[in-house]
Amino acid sequence: MSVDEIKIGGMGASRRRVEDNRFIRGKGKYVDDVVLPGMLHMEILRADVAHARIKSIDTSAAWEVPGVRLVLTGETMAARNLAWMPTLSYDTQAVLATDKVRFQGQEVAAVIADDPYIAKDACAKIVVEYESLPVIVNPDQAAAPGAALIRDDKENQPTNKIFDWEIGDKAGTDRAFEEADVISTIDLHYPRSHPSPLEPCGSIADYDRATGKLTVYMTTQAPHIIRAAVAMVAELPEHQIRIISPDLGGGFGNKVPVYPGYVISILASILTERPVKWIEDKTGNLISTGFGRDVYLQGQMALRKDGKILGMRMHTISDHGAFFSDAQPTKFKIGLMHSTFACYDVPAAHLTSTGYYTNKAPGGVAYRCSFRVTEAMFFQERMMHAAANDLGMDQAEFRRVNLVKDDMFPYRTAFGFLTDSGQYDKCMQVGMEAIGYATFKEEQEEARKRGRLLGIGISTMTEPLGAGNSREYDILGIKMFDSAELRVHMSGKAILRTGAKTQGQGHETTWAQIVAHELGIPADDIVVEEGDTDTAPFGMGTYASRSTPVAGAAVAMAARKVRAKARKIAAHLLEVSEEDIEWELGRFYVRGNHDRGVTIQDCALAAYSNMPDGMEPGLENVSYYDPPNLTWPFAAYFCKVEVDPATGVWDVLNFVAVDDCGVRINPMIVEGQVMGGLTEAYAMANMQYITFDEAGNCIGSNYMDYLLPTAWETPGFELHEVVTPCPHHPIGAKGVGECATVAGPAAFVNAVMNAIEHTGVRNIDMPLQPNRVFEALQTGQDVSGMPPVRVE
Amino acid sequence: MTSLYNEVAADPGADVPTRRVSISVNGEKRTVDVEPRLLLAHLLRQGLGLTGTHTGCDTTNCGACTVLFDGRPIKSCTMLAVQADGHEVETVEGLASASELHPIQEGFKECHGLQCGYCTPGMMMATKALLEKNPDPTEDEVRWALSGNLCRCTGYQNIVKSVLWAAEKMRGDEGEEA
Amino acid sequence: MYPSRFAYEAPTSLAEAIAILDRNGGEAKILAGGQSLVPMLKLRFAAPGTLVDINNIPGLSDHWLDKDGTLHIGALVRHEDLEFSTIIADSHPTIAAAAELVADPIVRTRGTFVGSVCHADPQGDWAATMVASGGQIIAQGPNGRRAIDVREFVLGPFTNALAYNEIAVEAVIPAATGTAKGGYLKLERRVGDFATASVAVNLDMHGDTVHRAGCALAGVGGRTIDANDAINGALKGKALTPENVEAAADAVAAMAEPRSDHRGSADYKRHIVKTFVSRILTNIANSEQKAA
């Protein structure tokens, strides 16, 4: 008899997580938990100024500190051709500064000592003499005539502009605007934010001169890309490099790039012939590693007066900091910004983008999103909100008129994406019902009469998750496929390895569920390993919600190939031809004779002990999966808030999230992802941002200034689901880990705006701090840009 | 030289004072020589190998390093190891007995109260202190009591659920015993 | 983050502690709860030669009301002790209201009331409640004890009136002569954030009439703002009518010296002060009505 899929922890089971068994006992193994014999400790001295020429670095006093083993500066690095390294966007980035420092927090020197206290003591004794240069902290300053040139190290870089880029149909879009009854505009700023996983970045480099092998424990979401990068930067042979990414204390995109600290620790280990541990402190993490967002979004929409969208234009001005090190597919300079409006039927669209260098930390990582999709969707839903108001149309109605209908799939968007599935209107209906949309306007009116300000905000989106297909998506030329290796042992137990890298998403639990679904082997009989480049097949890692769409698909394909071989073994065991074999979960049987069968475990044993003549022994497979398309989950979020008119403080009264991420492998984990994402969305809308003063000092360099919400402020969320399977994914799943971060912020902002827009306010840029909401209420004017750091 | 790293440390020289401290950690007396500036979190992690206590922020905000100090939750990155001399410290490693999990640990697993696991030990220790003081908290009381501990993954909703689950289980267990 | 080196002393008596301070001639710093000091050591904003840990000195961990109702808070009374105190809710409602808003719940188990006042952070909660309540700090040094009015104790940002060889051993907060009323409100963006603005109000009510009113502000100036005269001028001898509440709120708001920054404009912060004064007083008036 076939096995009960839920009982064996297969697809659809809210299987409790395997990895929790060690985490709840305090037995997780994060990089800082790893101790190697003879290990030294490294601390980095960072620039305290944002833009300055280095006149001299005196390290003599640091060398004198007892316990110091090595002091490194840009000069030492340069002697080994390691002062600069390539970024993931074909730029270069300083490892240790040689000529000048270009942002506050840039790496200037490193001390390697017997313990980190001593290394820190010695860092404090390094004297750096700077000659200050004009500081540029925003694109306006960067573009100004006569602006100081930040990247004077580069040839053919006469200005601070990094790129101009465009996509879409300019002429067609211009025509749409000529035909429009109403043109709606909006100007937004998406502030700089930081993914800020609780665990900072770090590495332990361990170079063994005897074998020539370099082992690096590293906080990385993409160990194989790192191995390739290290091979390139350090000029070491790839087979002699082993990257191990152990348990990660969160990532959210922050742990994708290659950071100077990793490279320095590697050189330090080569020079000292000892393991060298570098663990960044929180300030180092916040002021120097990959940030997210920091982009101005300007838009226009052409509308017919019945509410139909005719076309849209968008222009982005992005601030990339001192080095262009965005982690994104090569072809696209501003990530997948052109996924904006993918869920709406927009006939014509045109996007232009300009990127600038500034004296701020580099990054532009996909902070819990698929390459700037967060900005794209925030822009989309703020634009939709403004347009509905300009038309005098109901927010929900305007969206429903324009959303792509179920029978329009596959649908080619104006920017060329192919969306393939969804039930957008159904999601809207579920959400409207749950939030009580039908009676809200009345409720709002009543409340307003009593001086209370209620608002409702809607945000919907489909986002392109699971980059990519190899035709269009690569990073540093490596195509964005992924991989899985499944080995079934003779007892029917199995080990699975993938090229992805879990950082809280629960791969150890869900990958086993996919195998259970495909083979009927109980999930508890399958161990999942990731993160070790010596054992895992090559993969592009975990970010941009690509694990389930790509690596998860590879898992299914590997399991299917194993099943295909097992079928041959079953035929051999049952002494019938393969054509007469039928499959049910966990078991092959003879067609027409259901009782005559063998289990997958029987086949596994036979693969090692009784295989058919001529068959290669063993039962295993390595699959590389190149997805035919991205996956397109849909979200419809409804947020209800109350604004206190006396203080500008706003509270979330109710938040309804409807997510359609296709087939859910583990519903419990999917819901966990959505709630976590919504919390980051709330944080961005309300408090979580990084800004800089005129001197380039980072405001937000620790958790006193960079505010992450606690359990107290964070609202509760009500979750709903709609399931439209992905037509091309082997098990019908779509990405989900980032939907809530992507679609969430606009729901909060739209709700607050809805509560106060009777005053004439059109926009408050995030963060919606109480003072900014209050100011808008008082003045009826928009509040734009970043909160001023200090006004005398 | 901070003696936690002393397996690899060079001779500290006579001018670096250390102090002998005796601490009861998870019920076991540990005696170590430490430099006064050594943080308790670092002693636990490096010196005693109890790496379940994590350090997340350096500025006493995140609470990943929360342990119980004489039964009260403290942020162990904000206390010197020398201050623990003669006191009792309980870490996440002390929660489970050899054979069974603490109901709080069960609750976090059962209700998916963790994702990356980094904040989890601190959350659970703060929970233990709460439930000892208030065995039947409301959702708001749980949220308030855990507001000194940051989580980046879960959105807290399932953490709250985990705590309430554990509270109910612990009340049930006590009921059975009585 | 790793502190720089220091010597460490853990005296077991006040006399011993004072002798150590005296010997170190200003190079020593007292460690009580450590919730401000240890982060500063880690950031290396502070690098004292010697830390004098007073946590092992007996007799400093209690808070009590003496027979005339005066509240005494020992130097090692933690924020949490006051949050869960069973004796101060009626006698010292301003202190009781602030207790749960100090920092976060874990910090509150360790940080001390007296230490916070000594730290003299312009955004500190406890200094504001002390100023509003007319509190004193008892300092003990080689020549014995002296009582210092908190307004003369907090000299400026992060500066107090203790001599290098003195220890603040106790805070003393007088009782109301009639019924004590009070409140504390703080605008923070999230738990543990620095205050955008906070208001402490303390009233000594004789029947429906305000006998003495006290008020102080945090976060809206370079120091704790003493608004006692402003509120007392508006309310002394009067009932908490809406008009009087409004006048008091205006008078207090005029005392604020806020600076515009990323938490809000000066006008906004002043407005929050006014709103909070008005809310605290209105709550008191409403609860009075309910009681009557």
Image: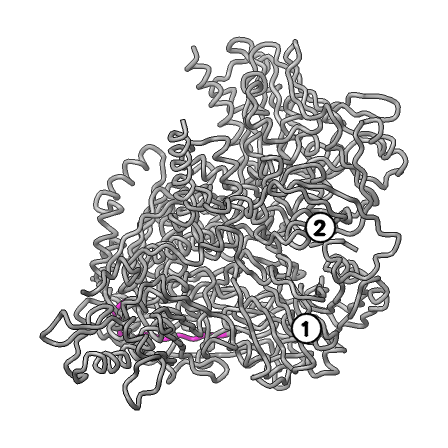
Horizontal relation, residue A384 to residue B139: left or right: left
Q: What count of labels does the image hold? A: 2
Q: Rounded to the nearest whole Å, what is the CA distance between mark 1 and mark 2?
A: 24 Å
Q: In which quarter of the image is residue A312?
A: bottom left
Chain at tag 2: C
Label of residue A264 in the image: 1
| Nearest the eye: C129 or A414 | C129
Please state the extent of the stretch shown in magenta in the rendering: A344-354
Label of residue B42 in the image: none
Q: Which residue of the protein is positioned furthest toward the bottom in this rendering?
A: A614
User: Looking at the image, do the residues carrying marks 1 and 2 touch, with CB atoms under 8 Å apart?
Assistant: no
Q: In which quarter of the image is residue A103?
A: bottom right
Tell me the amino acid under the disc marked 2.
Answer: Lys
Main secondary structure of the magenta stretch: strand
A353 part of magenta stretch = yes
Horizontal relation, residue A241 to residue A473: left or right: right
Label of residue C42 in the image: 2
